[in-house]
Every structure is written in C-alpha cells, then in structure tokens.
Image (tube, grey):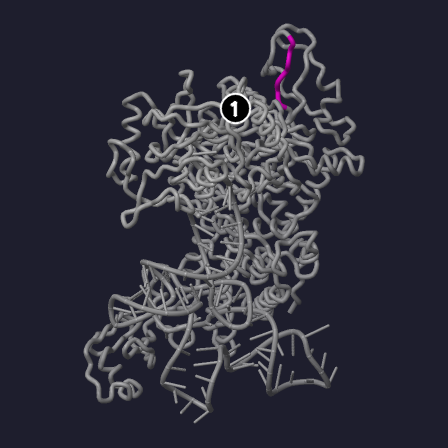
RNA sequence: GCGAGAGUGGCGGAACUGGCAGACGCACUGGACUUAGGAUCCAGCGGGUUAAACCGUAGGGGUUCAAAUCCCCUCUCUCGCACCA
C-alpha cells in the first residue's frame, strides 16, 4: 500500500483539472444554471484563514451542485483598487500596479494550491482598464440621469488614510479600515443618490427570504425609515420653519424649540439681539468639537437661547427657540420641537436651561406632576392639556393629529430616512478616475463617451499628501474642455473602491465582453446569484451598495433582475485563543504552513468540520490533527484493498441481504440521504460527521469477516459511495482513491449518489419505552408493528413490569416506530 | 436605549416540524500490538452510584403524556445602530 502523500496527490489533480479546464462553464439554456459566488478578496499579499474558510465552503457547494448536474458558474477575481497598494508603494517605492499584480499572482497560485475549482477564464481584477472603463461609463449614465451629483458638505475624513469616508465606513467615530479617529472636513465631492432608493431598499429587505435576518435587519436599521410628520412652526415675523417629528401626539406639550448649530436660521435669528455673541460663540464651540465627541451618548446637553420665539401652530403659544448641541443637522430638518415631559433628551435640556414642562400624556394609574418628575414619561397613556384631543389614547392620537395638521395645512405626513447619499470621491490615487472635466467657461463637463476610458497613469511618483497624487500630475489633469476646447482641469479624485465591488458579480457573467459593460444575454442567463457567501462585516457596506447599484443597472437596461443576490450565507470569523486572527494579536495561522504540513484536503476539511459555516470557527491545532487522521483512515481503508477490490463490480444493495450486510446497506443509503440533506442546508459539519460514521461502520464490517465475493462487492460499493460523498470536501484524495479503484475520475466529479428510500428504512426499529415520560427501557420491534402487539410486547418487559407494579395504566401514547409512553398512577 | 442573535459535557459541536440529550471530532483514561510510540487498533468517557434511584441543555415559572425545542419572567454574553427628534 502506498502511504498517503497529500502533496504529490494534490499537485497531480490540480494539474489534471487545469489541463482539462475542468471548471470552465458556458451558458447552456438546456441546463439549469447555478451561480455560486464568494466575496472576492482584496489582494493584500497572501490568503488568510478567513479566505480558506470562505472559499472552502463555496467550493464544496460548487462541486456538489455540479455533481448534481447543474451548470455551475463559480468565478473568482480581485478587488484590486485600494489604499494598501498605495501605502505599500509609498513605503517601498514601488508601483501600486506592480505590487497589486504580484500579489494577485501569488494569491491565485495559493487558491489553486487549495484545489478550489474556478472558471479562471472569467477572472477579473478591478484595477484593469477593461474593468474600470465600464464603471466610468456607468458613472456617466448615472450623471445623465441625475443620480450622481456634486456638492460641498461636511464629510468624514480619516487623517491617517488622508481621505474621505462614506457614512457607512465610519465605525463608532473611527475609520473602518485603520481605526483612526475620523474628523469632519468641508469638502466638495461626488455623491450617488442612494437615498432615492431608500424606501425600496428598505421594503425589499422583507422580500429577501434567502438572506439571514440579521443582515436584513442591519440594513433596515441602517436605512432607518421612520414615519412621522413635518410640522410648520411660525416665527414671530410670520416666516415658517419646519421640524420633523414622529410624536405629533405630544405637540401640545412643546415648550421650546431647538435648532442644530449648523441650521441656516441659527445665526440669522440671533442677529441684532442681545444673544448674538453667545450664539456665535456656542456655534463656534460645537463646530470645533469633533464628530465622535459630539456623538458621545452622555455628552451633556448644552445650548443657548437664540433671542427669538416661535408660535406653536396648535396652541398659538409663544415658545423660545434655542440652539442645542444635541440636535443633528443631518437628520430630519435639523430643527426639533422639544417636549420635555415626554422626551428624555428634551427633559434634560429643559432642566439644564430651566425651561417649563407641560404634561400632555398621563398614565392610567397615576397623575404626573411636572414639578416632581425626575425623568420624561415616554410610555403609553391618555392625552391631557391637548384641547380637542383630550382623552384619546396617545397612539390613536398620532393619526388624528396628523390628519388635523394636514387638513389645516400646518403639517405634512412624511417618511424620514437615516440613510444619506453615498459620497464616493476619494482623494487617493489607486482607484477608478472619476470621468469629469472642469472648465472655467463650461463648468462641470462629463468626459464624452468616445473619450473613455480615463486611464489611470501608472508612471507617477506617489507621496503622502492630503489630496490625490493625481492632482500633482499635470499630464493627467491638464486637458482640453470637450466642449469649448479651452484649457480645462480633469477631476483628480478617484471613486470609492466599493463602487467596483458593486457590480463585479455581473461582469463575471461576461468578463471578456468588450462591446459594452455587460452582455445582457449572458447576464440574464446567470443572474441572479443563486448563492452568495461572505463575511458578515459587509452586511451594510458592500451588500447595500450592490443592491443599490444593481437597481440602477436594471434601470439602464443592463440587468434583468432587481435584486442581485437570491440567497446569502454569512460565514463567521476564524477565532484563535478567543480573538479574531490578526497580526497584532499574534494568533495567525498561515494557510501555507497547513498546506505544507497536512495538505490542502486536511486544511479544507478542518475548516468545514470544526463548526457550522455561520458560526465563528474556533481554531484548534489538535482538531486539525483529527481531520488529518480521518483522511489517513480513509486512505488506508481504500488503498489497502484497492488491488483486491479492483476487479469487482461494486454494488450498494442486493436482494435478500441480512445481518451485517443489511445493516451496512441501510447505512449507505441513510448516509447519502443525510449528506444530501445537510448540504442543502449548509450543515457541512454534520455532513462530514455522517460520512465519518459510514467510514467507522465500514471498518467494523471488515473486521467481522465479510470474505465472500458478494460482501467484497458490497464493500467496494460502500467505498465508492464514501468517495463520492467526500469529493466536494476533499477532491484530491477522493479523485486519487477513485482512480486507484479503477474508476473514471471525470465521472466522479459529475455524479452525486442517489439513495434508495426503501433501503433507508429499517425493518427493525428501536422503540424508546417511557413510563410517565421517563425513559425506562428500549425495545426492538418490527417497523410499523401493530400497535396492540407492540403494547403487549412492551408491557411484558421486565423493567416495565417493575415500574408498573401496583399502578393502573391510564393512557398509552404511541409514536410510530419511535416511542411508547405509558401513563400510570 | 433600540434592533438582532446566542447560552447544551473538560473543549468544538449534534439533536429537521416537541418524542431515547450529548451524534461526530478533540482532549482524557484503561487495554492490545510493540525495543519504543506522539503510529494503529479495542474499550470507556455529563454528574452521581458497587448497581440502581436520582440530578442534568444559563436561572425561575408554565403548557404538555412528553420540552434543549413552545409560552412568560430573570440573568449573562456576542453583534449591529445609537442624543435619529
């Protein structure tokens, strides 16, 4: 017997697949398609365990679906633009392009070494002109439709990365990539009008049954849809200003208003009043505080009187207008009505500034006294001090008051969203150039389609500066205006790299297409993605952007579907010693080391066996040993008897089988059923466990003799089933052993075993015998045995008799083929 | 605070619609084979007991013949959002 030598075997089969283009796939309308996608990696240098896990899961599913006869698209590519390339270039004086392509070459080889089966003809690197040129074209189309616009606004800026970040890319006030504290900066930049799709993106979250609820709920949370009303308050001079509230039921309890420091009225109102200086100073102070400080939850409420009053439209009361640090310009209208009796923040502010409190909702069981309240009353109750609405339940009052406001023209029913438009300008070099030209006479001019692509120059020196290095590269930015032909300046910002990842899955379907961005025919054959697999960290970023982008491309007629990803699987992180693997923690396991020591099959198997895909995987070196041991056990099982089994015709059943043979036949078919079922639900760990059981039983079967030819044929059949079930998980070993047994390997990769339902059922079943719900005995019985007969058998059992002694049977519950419960007392 | 999810042996984890809790693996213990074993094989492995009884799925109640699973309350942990009006 040859010993198990993973390296030689793996190299052999990888070469075999490569030579035959085994994973090449073409559109074939006669076959059912299956588009399986894993999130493409950033080419940072080398593959890490998170990738190994992600892609192992994907590879199992892809191979399994192929074995089931589906036409499987399983592509791979590179999210190749981004800052690490630029940083590496600055540190080492090399070109980002060179650095990136080197990394890609290395990592591609690593993926191949792990035996993942991709259709490499469809490989994409987003930094290639042939990719990003189409994105520029899409930008122009969006520009035509008014879905891209430019505005000046305070933006999140990471001082370390020296660039702008979208709202989604700020995590708790820090940069999502480097963790540096984000500051606010006033910049003019380009925005994608994602808010126009806010409602649809929100509502469709409930129409994505194949997505984990966690993800859709995070997206809904992020979009932050809330129903309310815009209410118009009047200034003393008669001018109106508008606030947004979700609580119109508390309108009669408004005792003051608060404006955000950035609100356009803030400085204006105080002008010429005694408050002018105070307000100006306060606004200055708040502006100087950075965002994370401002967002601090326990930040003390501060504010100053603006010097002016407003009129409550319902009561006619004159109420003071304040400027407060807790009101955000970005949400609603940047101005609020304050109801200290029923809103905790307003309450705190009222206490701070000594403002009156009017109760308008009271609980049923007690009276609220504004003097003695120590916090706002926010629960349900009945309206008081609310004129015609007195006595109503406050929830019902919301609708009635809104109706009244609309009738009288004092307010409008509105829906407000937390989601902001997506700022995509980045002051960096290694990204997709925004195809825009600024001309002194003609203004903002989109690059004409015929002039695309705007190619990113690859011959410039890269330094750390607070703006794109392209801005120091005249050869790039000096252009002539496409309209007037005068000297003009090219936009030097590049696009957020999340733009590239928002449509790469579409380009895979037609990666070689060069007559346009997408070949609709092929896109339509493959889309939507049947199964998407990736990390939870992209729950709102990439996944939300992609849903948005796909809608736009749908409207541009490039894609037929509205939602790009039918089913989503979010795999957990790889944990070691209680923390996510990271260089700083020093708990990284290098996939290369694993491959060298155990081979790719073991690395894959362990990643899949140690825990179910959605959960975090706790890395355990001894567990890897266990997986390795199992594979060796399988190896020995087959290799030791390959010669003697070689000439036999395998069988997985025969009529009249009995004893051990019957048991084994049953186990074969049951295992096929179980593994098939588990793979359908992504329970890869339990699928492996049941294959292990079958292997264990096969060893037992051998141990017991099984010398005659029929038993040997059955043994061969069992082994073949094991190999076919194992193929998606450990394709190299399965192929090698299959071949050792004289099988056609091309066939192995294309045949998922079927089970015989009759053989899954056992003739004898074990019945659990309970007395008063407690297990007292077990008993073998014939399948589907007559209930009366079963009852008699069980009552005759010694242990049962002992427990029944002196008692009367009240009831007997029989669960067919499973359990009998005798109730007595 | 809001939203989502989780809590099962020493560990990773099983148990689809309520029906024998702990599959499979790791670790551990004993044995076999061996000059040797960190290889392999056999046996054991929730607590408890000579054996049983009994106790066990975060804790407490409930529904049910029967609950890890369903309902209510409490606790703990993880994740996301967070002065969102």
Is residue A59 placed above or below A310 in the rendered structure?
A: below
Q: Is residue A290 left or right of residue A266?
A: right
Give the percent coordinates (x, y) of residue A739: 58, 59
Residue bearing mark 1? A266
Give the farthest residue toward the right. A93
Residue A160 in sight in this render: yes
Rendered-image quadrant of the N terminus of chain A: bottom right
Q: Is residue A718 left or right of residue A135?
A: left
Residue A439 included in the magenta stretch of the image: yes
Q: What segment carries the magenta color?
A: A434-440
Q: Residues within 10 Å of mark 1 (few under 14, many from 20)?
A: many
At 23% from the left and 73% from the top, the residue drawn is A813
| Residue nearest the viewer, comparing A106 with A235 | A235
Q: Secondary structure at mark 1?
A: helix
Chain at tag 1: A
Residue A558 included in the magenta stretch of the image: no
Residue A561 in sight in this render: no
| Residue nearest the viewer, comparing A355 with B42 | A355
């Amino acid at each position: 017997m040859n010993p198990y030598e993973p390296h030689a075997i793996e190299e052999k089969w990888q070469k075999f697949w490569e030579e035959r283009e085994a994973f090449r796939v073409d559109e074939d309308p006669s076959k059912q398609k299956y588009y399986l996608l894993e999130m493409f990696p950033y080419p940072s240098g080398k593959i890490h365990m998170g990738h190994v896990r992600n892609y192992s899961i994907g590879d199992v599913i892809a191979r399994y679906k192929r074995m089931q006869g589906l036409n499987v698209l399983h592509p791979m590519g590179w999210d190749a633009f981004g800052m690490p390339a630029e940083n590496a270039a600055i540190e080492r004086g090399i070109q980002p392009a060179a650095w990136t392509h080197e990394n890609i070459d290395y990592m591609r080889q690593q993926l191949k070494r792990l035996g993942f089966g991709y259709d490499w003809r469809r490989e994409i690197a987003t930094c290639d002109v042939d990719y990003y040129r189409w994105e520029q074209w899409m930008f122009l189309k969006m520009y035509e439709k008014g879905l891209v616009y430019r505005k000046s606004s305070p933006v999140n800026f990471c001082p370390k990365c020296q660039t702008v970040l979208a709202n989604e890319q700020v995590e708790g006030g820090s940069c999502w990539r480097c963790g540096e504290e984000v500051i606010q900066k006033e910049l003019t930049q380009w925005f994608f009008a994602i808010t126009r799709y806010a409602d649809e993106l929100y509502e469709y979250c409930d129409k994505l049954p194949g997505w984990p609820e966690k993800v859709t709920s995070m997206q809904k949370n992020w979009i932050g849809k809330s129903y309310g009303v815009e209410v118009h308050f009047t200034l003393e001079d008669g001018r109106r200003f508008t606030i947004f509230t979700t609580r119109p039921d508390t309108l009669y309890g408004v005792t003051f208003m608060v404006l955000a420091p950035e609100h356009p009225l803030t400085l204006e109102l105080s002008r010429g009043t005694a408050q002018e200086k105070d307000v100006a100073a306060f606004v200055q102070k708040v502006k100087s505080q950075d965002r994370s400080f401002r967002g601090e939850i326990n930040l003390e409420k501060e504010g100053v009187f603006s010097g002016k009053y407003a009129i409550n439209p319902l009561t006619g009361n004159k109420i003071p207008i304040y400027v407060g640090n807790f009101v955000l310009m970005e949400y609603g209208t940047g101005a609020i009505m304050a109801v200290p009796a029923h809103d905790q923040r307003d309450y705190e502010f009222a206490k701070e500034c000594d403002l009156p409190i009017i109760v308008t909702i009271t609980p049923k069981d007690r009276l609220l006294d504004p003097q003695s309240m120590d916090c706002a009353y926010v629960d349900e109750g009945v309206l008081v001090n609310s004129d015609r609405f007195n006595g109503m339940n406050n929830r019902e009052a919301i609708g009635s008051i809104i109706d009244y406001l609309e009738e009288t023209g004092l307010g409008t029913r509105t829906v407000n969203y937390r989601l902001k438009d997506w700022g995509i300008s980045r002051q960096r070099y290694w990204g997709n150039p925004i195809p825009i030209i600024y001309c002194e006479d003609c203004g903002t001019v989109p690059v004409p389609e015929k002039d695309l692509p705007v190619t990113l120059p690859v011959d410039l020196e890269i330094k750390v500066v607070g703006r794109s290095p392209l801005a120091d590269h005249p050869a790039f930015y000096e252009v002539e205006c496409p309209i007037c032909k005068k000297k003009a300046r090219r936009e030097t910002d590049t696009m957020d790299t999340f733009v590239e990842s928002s449509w790469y899955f579409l380009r895979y379907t037609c990666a070689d297409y060069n007559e346009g961005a997408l070949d609709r025919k092929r896109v339509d054959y493959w889309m939507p993605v049947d199964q998407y697999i990736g990390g939870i960290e992209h729950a709102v970023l990439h996944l939300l952007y992609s849903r948005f982008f796909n809608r736009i491309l749908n409207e541009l007629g490039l894609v037929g579907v509205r939602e790009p990803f039918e089913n989503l699987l979010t795999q957990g992180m790889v944990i070691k010693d209680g923390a996510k693997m990271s260089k700083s923690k020093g708990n990284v396991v290098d996939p290369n080391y694993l491959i060298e020591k155990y081979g790719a099959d073991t690395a894959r198997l362990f990643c899949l066996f140690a825990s179910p895909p959605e959960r975090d995987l706790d890395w355990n070196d001894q567990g890897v040993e266990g997986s390795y041991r199992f594979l060796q056990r399988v190896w020995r099982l087959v290799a030791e008897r390959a010669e003697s089994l070689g000439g036999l015709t395998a069988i997985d059943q025969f009529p009249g089988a009995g004893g051990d043979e019957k048991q084994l036949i049953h186990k074969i078919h049951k295992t096929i059923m179980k593994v098939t079922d588990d793979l359908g639900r992504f329970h890869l760990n339990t699928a492996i466990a049941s294959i292990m059981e079958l292997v264990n039983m096969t060893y037992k079967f051998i141990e017991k003799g099984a010398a005659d030819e029929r038993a040997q044929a059955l043994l061969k059949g069992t082994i073949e089933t094991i190999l076919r079930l194992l193929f998606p998980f450990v394709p190299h070993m399965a192929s090698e052993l299959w071949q050792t047994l004289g099988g056609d390997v091309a066939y192995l990769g294309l045949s998922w075993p079927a089970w015989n339902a009759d053989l899954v059922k056992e003739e004898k079943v074990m019945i659990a015998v309970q007395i008063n719900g407690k297990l007292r005995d077990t008993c073998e019985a014939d399948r589907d045995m007559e209930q009366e007969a079963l009852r008699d058998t069980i009552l005759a059992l010694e242990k049962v008799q002992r427990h029944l002694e002196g008692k009367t049977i009240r009831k007997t519950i029989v669960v067919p083929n499973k359990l009998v419960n005798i109730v007595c007392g």
